[in-house]
Every structure is written in structure tokens, then in C-alpha cells.
Image (tube, coloured by chain):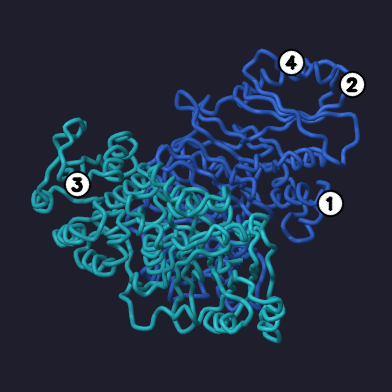
Chain colours: A blue, B cyan
Amino acid sequence: MIDVAIMGHGVVGSGVAEVLTKHPDNIAARAGEAINIKYILDLRDFPESPLFDRFTTDFERIVNDKDVRIVAELMGGLEPAYTFVKRCLLAGKSVVTSNKELVAAKGYELLSIAKAQNVNFLFEASVGGGIPILRPLSQCMAANEIDEIMGILNGTTNFILTKMISENMSFEDALKMAQELGYAEKDPTADVGGHDTCRKVCILAALAFGKHVYPEHIYTEGIENLNLCDAQYASSADYAIKLIGRVARAQDNRITATVYPALVSSDSQLSSVNDVFNAVLVRGDATGDVLFYGKGAGKLPTASAVVADIIDCVKHLEARKYLFWEDYSDGYVCDHNNDVVNLYVRAGIESEQAVTAIKKAFDHKDISLDFLCLPPLISKKETAFICGPFVEKDLRSLIEQIKDIKVISILHVID
Amino acid sequence: MIDVAIMGHGVVGSGVAEVLTKHPDNIAARAGEAINIKYILDLRDFPESPLFDRFTTDFERIVNDKDVRIVAELMGGLEPAYTFVKRCLLAGKSVVTSNKELVAAKGYELLSIAKAQNVNFLFEASVGGGIPILRPLSQCMAANEIDEIMGILNGTTNFILTKMISENMSFEDALKMAQELGYAEKDPTADVGGHDTCRKVCILAALAFGKHVYPEHIYTEGIENLNLCDAQYASSADYAIKLIGRVARAQDNRITATVYPALVSSDSQLSSVNDVFNAVLVRGDATGDVLFYGKGAGKLPTASAVVADIIDCVKHLEARKYLFWEDYSDGYVCDHNNDVVNLYVRAGIESEQAVTAIKKAFDHKDISLDFLCLPPLISKKETAFICGPFVEKDLRSLIEQIKDIKVISILHVID
């Protein structure tokens, strides 16, 4: 029997306790040993819980108990999670976590400690909730060179965008609905500002390309300024708008990594990923496109991924699993302004020559230009077009120079 | 350095050699050791191959060479693959294979030998080609009770069905096109008859529910009798037709397992899986629906899955990976006639009372009935409807008793 400790009894933490105690025999069969929850760390009391006698408010009991071989950190946030995880690893315990903020900020350091201590540090649940992504990436695709990973990694923003596109709901109304349904937190900044997606891109990038990328290295644009008019243009032209996290191999062992809302063509598998669902598209040189799809959040999906990591730790108590990456190095992430992109532009028409001026701006360049039809609900004097592919900063400079229009919004376009 | 042997130098076998030799340093880093192809078994000569000096026609050299720790079987078919794999396992070598026929027919026996010999027998490439399915199923979802797996598991038939639905092509023309493009073999029986799908369902069922299921236990219907008219009805009513392999948990530790073409509603993620793509939908009690999507066949996708298994064998030369299931037991698979289903029925109208007779047949039952619109291309005197849900044999008996119509075709419907 293996003793484990669960730190945090919130949504995910209580889910982990539930999954571990719901089918204990099956889990024991899969792990090769029974798993016993010895401690649950939480500042609150849970007298109604069937596990009421396992609760403690004292982290020292856990870290000093030699019998506890595996600790699940499900508190979220950077502190005290970081200090606790570090001390558990240094004490020779394997740690599993669903905390993407922690892994994105401290993954390299914690993996280094785990390696030195010959224990495991696993975090399948930190990306894609219950969708298996990290393990297939690191194992099943071991024989591939990964060229690109692109995904819808945040269920809250995807729910809001789905409502905006399919029900013509404003950003504010959709956010309010998401909050009422429990999909969005009271302070939705991490989700709608793209920071949650950014942290997941850090983790995917590190796993796929072998080097830690910190959140500050990734250009991140949220959906908070997205206008309903843009959603209507997109929708009439058969595009969806999705918050896309993306990392791709670039020249000279560098990578590009971005997070932004983008028009996604209906030909893309990602365009039909709606509501709170997540999807990750992995492009490998041998496999081609592989897509993983499912619920990216929620109590039981996330908990099941955490428990799968716990089972893996039990099976690898002696033989450490290979999971490691290098630290970030200067200049590793390319400036996104040099990426080749397609852009959607919506602009007010300031004179009768506007359309001619737009056409002229993109003339005799290797740039294609498509005007979008005016959606039925928009009656203002404006126009929208998609231009590219071209180096982002040069394309933006061409757009800026067009006289006779006033740019209202610019969004990326992904085929 | 670890010596491996590749048996078979056809499409997948040559792909495995290519993947192993294309990025040897990356593969060595991931496996923890360099991987050396010591032998390639094939009856043919390949003087142009850069590995020309590794070829042998003599299986005894491989099985008797103690240095060869891992053998990849990529010959396909039951014999001599079965005999060779068995002898390699008995000789203490780990074996990886992409051969679904072999695993479906002999999986339990070969896993038992592998267990007794403390070596690995892995077969990720046997289902879904390059899409990671088996490993996520057995590992990432270890904390789930799986309720159902449903998938499009054969690219050839999916290509044909896509052409029939989206381009109004007849089965014969679509098959011919698939053969010309190299997607279908000269003798397409295993694909279009559903047998290939059936073998993959056997493997998925064994992995998800822990008991071997042999192909003869699974009700299997191919697509060879599918009529273009059915495709047109389906398409006008916003359904796709897909060859669906399915296995689900039933009462009393039994399962249901079937392979048949079915109308799939456009609400299902499976309906938009087109051309040669495969997708597998896994329903877990904790994760909810998770979908894996990608190219289910092809040289490099399949080869990359085989190489991932080889890497896993290298990493687990001493510590065996947990992968095992029990043998089949009598009555384990339920009679599919007792499944609760929805059926699509197309029938000739034999009298003016036909529609009244159909309505009457399904009156005062817990069965819903929906008539489909006559597609523009069909001018005959006929009708089509969807009825259910109801126990299959009883529903069929109700349909048979309807006077005034002559049933032309019946297909399953999946929401």
C-alpha cells in the first residue's frame, strides 16, 4: 500500500479524493498497489467528508512523514504551492500537480530537483484537463519531430467566443453567462486575458521542443477587446473566432510562440470545437496532424488526469520516468512581428476611394486580398478584408499607410 | 546501444527503418540509448537501400542472436507472423507490431507469453495508425471507468463513404478511386467488409474492459451493400454515413461490440471526420468524451507509432510495462439483437395507406418516428424514416410486420 497526500480540497482536490476512493480495486489493479490517502491539507474543516479524519492544516506533517511517497498539489497559484512542492521533492517525494501557473513559472527548476532526487514530477492535468496530451506528446510521439502545436486551451474563453459567434451575444453578456454557469471566475482576467492559455503554451512548448519558455516570452493577446461586429463578419464568411495558443519550430533551433484570438477557417478541425471544449492539434513530421479533443476543465476530468499521474508515480517509484527539459536561453523565442501571417482588418470608409486604396496597397506584392461581405446586421459605412500571407510587421505597416480608411480592428487569421 | 530487428520491409517496415535512421540522435535521447537496426528480414533483396547490408532471409539468425533485444513485426497477416512473434517472445525478446489481425486473433496468448518471459509485447500502431490511442487508453485513462468506445477505424471505407455522401459517387466508383489512389488494396474485402475495423474493436475492447474478444464474437457488417440512395437520404437529413466500430459496457460485467455502417448525426464529432482520417471517441465516467483524431494509416504515421513502441521497449528492458488482459469467457459479448438501437428504414410504397401503416406500426410504443424528406435526386415512389430507440430484434419485427411497404434497406442510426 502506498500512502499519498493531497494538498488542497477545492474543486480538483476533492475530485481527486473522489476518484481515488470510488473504484479503489480498479485503481489498485492498475497501479499494482493499493493507494491510501493519508493526509488532505486544507485550512478549512470538512466534518461531512467520509475522509474527515485525514484532514490536516499542517504541511510539516506531510513533508516529514517518510511513509508519504507521493503528494498531489491541487491548491493552485504560485505560493504556497511552489514552496510546498519544492520541499516535497527535496524530501524525496514524487509530486503531481494540475497547476499550470506553477509549471509554466517553475517547471525547469522543479524538474531539475526531481531529477537530482530521482523522483517524479508529473503534471498531465495542467494542460487540457482530462484530455491526455502531455503523455502522448512525450511518449507516443517520441518518434516524431514535432513541427507545430496549435490549440484551444481555455474552456471559458471558448464558451464566450462560441456564444458571440453563434448567438450574437456581446462579450460582456457572454462573460456574465459564463460566470453564472460557473465556467468563469469572478475575476476572469487569467482566462479572458489569455494568460491561462499562455501558461499552457509554455508547457506544451517545453515538452515538444525541449526548452523551458516563460510566460513573459510569449506574445499574449486576450479576447476582452473583441467586438461583436468582428464576430459577425467572421461568421458570415464561414470563420469561427477562437483563442489560439500556438508554438512552432522556427529556424536555427528557435521557436515562435503566440496566444491571440484568430479567425479560424471552417476547414480547420479547430473551428468546430465549441463551448467549454478544448482541442490540441499536433503536427508531427511522421504522424501528420493529430487532434486531441475533450473537456479541458471540470472537477472529474481534471481529477482523473491527476489520478493517472499518481498511478504512474506508483508504478515508477524506483525507476524514474524520463521527463525533463532544458532552461530557457536568450533569443530562443522569435519576435512574433517577424512571423508570416494573414490578417483580418475591419475599417471605416472615409472616402469613396477607400476600396481602390486598399486594392492598391496590396498590389504587386505576393499578398492576396479578400473582401468580406457586409453581414446583415451591420449597416455602417465600413469594410473588412483579409490580407496576407506576409511578415506581420510589414503587413501592418502596409495597412497603416492606406489612406481613406480608419482601421477599427485587426485580428489574425488561421487557415 | 540496443540491437533491434525489423521483420518485413513493405510500406510500414521501410517506414520504421526510415524513422529510426532519420533522427537517430533524437531517438537515442528519448530512448536513453542508441538504437541499431541489426537485421531486416525480407525475402526480397534491396540493393539500393542504405541499409542493404542488414537484410537477411533467415529468421533463425534473428531469433538466435542474443544481442537482438527487440523485434518489430511488420509483415502483416497471421502466418508466419504468429509463429515468428511467438518464437521471439519465447526467446526473451520484446516484440512490437502493427499487425491488428495478429493481436485480435492471438493477443491473449502472446501477452501471456510476454508476461511469463518478463518481456514486452506492444502494438500501439495496430489501432489508429499514428494516432496515440492504446497508450492513452491504458495509461492516461487509468483513473477512469470507460463506458464506451466508438470510432471510425478504417481510412479506406471512410474515404469511400465520404465520396458517396459529399460527391454522390457510387460505391463502385468510390472504391475504384480509392484503389487508384493507393488507399484500397486490390482485394478490398478486409476493409469494405468491416473485418479490419472488427479487429481493431477487438483490441480496443480488450484494453478498455480487460478481456480478449475474438473477431467472431463481434457482429460485423461492411459497407459493400450500401446504396447511393441511402447516402442521399442521409445527406439531405444532415447525417453522414460512417462505418462505426463500437464497444460498450453492458450489465453483469458483459459488453456489447458491433461493427456496422450507421447514419451519424451532424451533432456528433464523428460526423465531420472525412476522407482517410480516423477518430476514436472514448467515453469515461470521469473524463466525459475524449476524441483522438488523425491519419489512421500510411507509411510514416504508422511507422512513428511502431518506433514509439520500440523506444518504450528500450526504456523498459528490465521493468516490464503493465499491459495484460484475460482470455475471453463464454457469453461475455451480448447478442447485438438485444441492443437498444435507432434504425433508418428505406422502403418502397406499395399502396396509398403506406404512411398511415407506418405511423400505426409505431403507435402507442415508446418509439419516436421521423420521416426523412425525399432527396431531390430520388423520384421513385418510396419513403424513408428513422425509428427507435427500441430493442433491435423487436424493432425489426415491428418493421417487418408493416403492410403496404417493401423494405429496401435498414441501417443503424447513431446520435
Q: Work out how far the residue at label 2 is from the one at label 4, CA to CA, in angstroms.
A: 16 Å
Instruction: Label 1, secondary structure: give it.
Output: helix
- Amino acid marked by disc 1: Asp
The structure residue drawn at horizontal position 69% and vertical position 49%, both measured from the top left corner, is: A158
Q: Position of residue B415 (x, y in %)?
A: 61, 66
In this picture, residue A263 sits left or right of residue A338? right
Q: What mark, if any, has residue A173 been given in the picture?
A: 1
Mark toward the viewer: 4 or 3: 4
| Residue carrying label 3 | B5
Q: Which residue is mark 4?
A: A361
Reading the chain from its start, which is encountered first: label 2 or label 1?
1
Labels 1 & 4 near each other (Cβ < 8 A): no
Q: Is residue B339 above or below residue A280?
A: below
The one of B98 and B90 positioned closer to us in this rendering = B98
Q: Are marks 3 and 1 on the same chain?
A: no
Instruction: Work out how far the residue at label 4 is from the one at label 3, CA to CA, in angstroms.
Output: 60 Å
Between discs 1 and 4, the one toward the N terminus? 1
Foreground: disc 3 or disc 1: 3
| Tag of residue A350 | 2
Disc 2 from disc 1: Cα separation: 31 Å
- A211 above or below B83? above
Write down the quadrant of residue A185 in the picture.
Answer: bottom right
Q: Chain of mark 2?
A: A
